Amino acid sequence: MPGFQRKGIGKALLEQTFAKAIELGYKAIIIFGTPGNYVGRGFKSCKRYNVCLEGDVFPTALLVKELETGFFDDRKYYVYESPVFEIEERLADEFDKCFEPMEKSYQLSQEEFYILSQSVMR
């Protein structure tokens, strides 16, 4: 919501996430995101670390943050989506009924993310 933007909430959430990931022993964080939202928090292009999707695809929106400097070496790393993201639409609809209905809207940032997640680097 616009009233909550530019107040440092996102930055604080990311910093808390980094601290928790380090506490849990993670060496890196790999996400899909709009680079402009994450580069300032230390994320870099997946290509810099040779991290890609199956088929040697380097999506523009695939971002990497090393939590342990030098963790990535000269090997190639592949990202595979977790089965947790395989959601049955019927179950999602049932879950949504637990909340007050909201009007669905389309944000321009959704198109920007779609473009970035479908574009690849060579």
Image: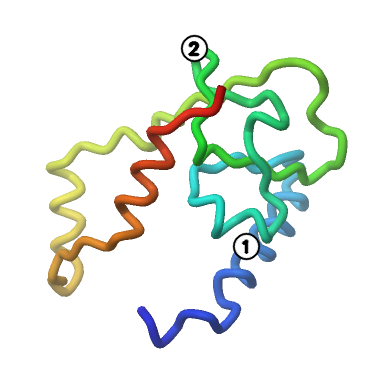
Q: Position of residue 60 (x, y in %)?
A: 51, 37
- How many residues crowd mark 2 within 10 Å: few (<14), some (14–19), many (20+)? few
Above or below: residue 3 compared with residue 19: below
Q: Residue 2 appears at what percent x and percent y?
A: 38, 82
**Disc 2 designates what residue?**
55
Taking depth in this image into account, of 60 and 80 the one nearest to the observer is 60
Q: Secondary structure at mark 1?
A: helix
Q: Residue furthest bottom?
A: 3
**Of 53 and 68, the residue lying toward us:** 53
The answer to the question of whether label 2 and label 1 lie on touching residues, with beta carbons closer than 8 A, is no
Which residue has dot 1 on it? 14
Q: Gap between marks 2 and 1, in whole Å?
A: 30 Å
Labels 2 and 1: the sequence-earlier one: 1
Q: Quadrant of residue 74?
A: top right
Q: For residue 105, which quarter of the picture?
A: bottom left
Look at the picture and state if 24 lies above or below 118: below
Which image quarter is the C terminus in?
top right
Position above or below: 11 against 59: below
Q: Give amino acid for label 1.
A: Leu
Farthest front residue? 122
Residue under the point 66% across and 20% down? 77
Of the residues shown, which amino acid type is indicated by label 2?
Gly
Residue found at the very far right of the displayed protein:
70
Count residues near mark 1 (Cα–Cα under 10 Å), then give few for <14, some for 14-19, many for 20+.
some
The residue drawn where x is 14% and y is 51% is 93
The quadrant of the image that shows the N terminus is: bottom left
x and y percentages locating residue 82 in the rendered image? 45, 31
Mark 2, secondary structure of its residue: loop
Q: Is residue 53 above or below residue 108?
A: above
Q: Residue at x 71, y 32 (%)?
A: 48
